[in-house]
Amino acid sequence: MAVPLLKKRLAKDRCARSVMLALTVLSLLLLVAMGVGLYLKSEMILDRYSLWTLLTTSDWKPLKGSFGFLPFIASTLAVTALSILIALPISLLTALYLSEYAHSWTKRVVFPVLDILAGIPSVVYGVWGTLIIVPWIADALGPHFVDYTSGYTVLASGIVLGVMILPVLVSLFIEIFTIVPQDYRDAAASLGATKWQVCRKVILRKSLPGIIAAVVLAISKAFGETIAVLMVCGNSASIPHSLFDPCYPLPALIANNYGEMLSLPLYESALMFAAFILFFIILVFNFASRLLLRRVEKRYKL
Amino acid sequence: MDTETQTFAGAFQRFGQWKETDGSEARTAGAPEGENTIDIQGLNVYIQDKQILKDVTLQLFDRKITCIIGPSGCGKTTLLRSINRMIDTTEHVRVEGNVIVDGENIYGPKAEITHIRKKIGLLSQRPTPLPMSIYDNIAFGCRIHGTRNKKKLDAIVEQYLRATGLWDEVKDRLHNPASGLSIGQQQRLCLARGLAVEPQFILADESTSALDPVSSKHIEDLFLQLRERYGIIMVTHTLRQALRIADYVVFMYLGEVIEKGPADVLFNHPQHELTKQYLSGVFS
């Protein structure tokens, strides 16, 4: 009696295992399929032009047959970098304050607010950027630096994007700081360290790998953010030379034009190639950050 | 039961006598020669409205080892953490009373915490090497207090690694992560790190309980050496350890100091019934 029951249990176990394995492989295959699909679709434009020309020229006149992707790539990188530059210091200090200095009741008030901020749809951020940030740059900030700016700029995109990833970063950082054992804080404090010294020399140091991982996550999100950026970036296909120039990141390019220009196969292929570049940037970025993370962990043996 | 109590008391007495004939004079009663003391006056500590320490009045001497003994949850660690205001890190804590160090009340309105903690170091239960190299661990305290000179730091690092017997073991890998040391070495590193800021007193919170017997012995021996220069206040769960190294003993029970005095007096002639019972192992 017992033996058939055991057999049944073991069979179930094997079954569960293979189902889970299959699903895992499936999700991995999805990534490959996506990459291959995008590549196949962009083959047409890659046959027509050399990869080098596509990536390094900045002339974008799809109807006249010139496809230079450099402005889009440059815009994507500029906007993402700016958003991290804005969000990282603010979120680090906010998270340090909340986890190390703040009273428990402050946390009880702030945490739900952060969650709400993180949950607001990106289109709302876009509207906020268009109504507040863009006019502010055009009328108040811009005139101090340049003769004329429309307000729809790299700066506006960076600010909106920075604000969007801020709550995510703060939540992640707080999680990371909470993992640092209290013993480390006590050890440093009992030597006479001030709270700020404990934060700077112990907490930040101990959490460095976690901080890097969180920033990678935030950057990946920033790379792909479409709607909010599209609403404030100016959508002008030229390489931005200052914060007050308009720009045109890859996701905005795809979202703006896909569906309209499908009658032109070459244009469609160009947009597919844009998606492929984005896909590739994120892939490379993730691999690179993984390498960095491993080196940091090895270096400090954390 | 009564006879058992007596046998245990006898054993303690014999042990005490053996120590005396061994030439150890530090255990004899009498006024301490050190000038610096920590005066705890009427200390009450409440955590979330639960009273953890009840009117503790106690004097702790420089250049002596004072062991605080008592059953779990009697407030030993809270008392220790009150002495250098590490108690401040606990939430919902309320402290009443005075702790006078060098004529300064550390709970006074003008007291400055980092200064107090520099004077009174803490060696925790488990070793906590900071996430940096061996060298940087020792230099940490000096750096936060403003010493930047490389030569000075080098000298300090060597001095205190020697003082804790670590120098020969680690001198070739000073810049390796401290987490690579064995647990006993880590605890000696933490002790060296604490000494490097030149405290007057060292608080030790069951600092040998996480260690193997050999490392534990090593720390005890270090304490006996360090007694020449520092006042050591040690919380211990091991009666035998207190017996081996204490000059003074404080017995606590449920947040109160039941009995205190020179080690040989308290171990051999405990006055209070609770002390007698604790020493004889009726409860622990």
Image (cartoon, rainbow, N blue to C red):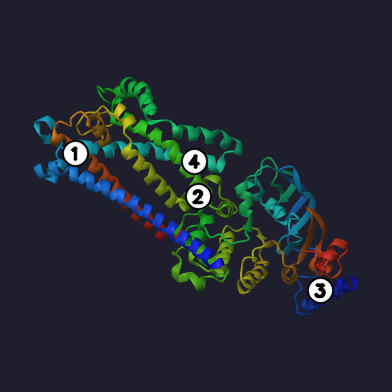
Q: Nearer the viewer, mark 2 or mark 1?
A: 1
Q: Which amino acid does label 3 sit on?
A: Phe
Residue A19 shown left or right of residue B201 in the figure: left
Q: Is mark 1 on a helix, strand or loop?
A: helix
Disc 2 with disc 4 on a shared chain: yes
Residue A95's label in the rendered image is 4
Closer to the chain start, of discs 2 and 1, is 1
Q: Are marks 2 and 1 on the same chain?
A: yes
Q: Give the chain of mark 3.
A: B
Give the Cα separation between the discs numbered 2 and 3.
Answer: 47 Å
Q: Residue A70 carries which label?
A: 1
In percent of width and height, residue B90 lies at: 65, 47
Q: Which residue lies furthest to the right in this view?
A: B2
How far apart are the alpha carbons under marks 1 and 4?
A: 36 Å
Disc 1 or 4, which lies upstream in sequence? 1
Question: Separation of disc 1 and disc 3 at Cα?
Answer: 85 Å
Describe residue A4's horizontal placement relative to residue A295 as left or right.
right
Q: Is the same chain shared between marks 1 and 4?
A: yes
Q: How far apart are labels 4 and 3 at the CA level?
A: 55 Å
> Helix, strand or loop at disc 4?
helix
Q: Residues within 10 Å of mark 2 (few under 14, many from 20)?
A: many
Q: Which chain carries label 1?
A: A
Q: Which one is in front, B276 or A69?
A: A69
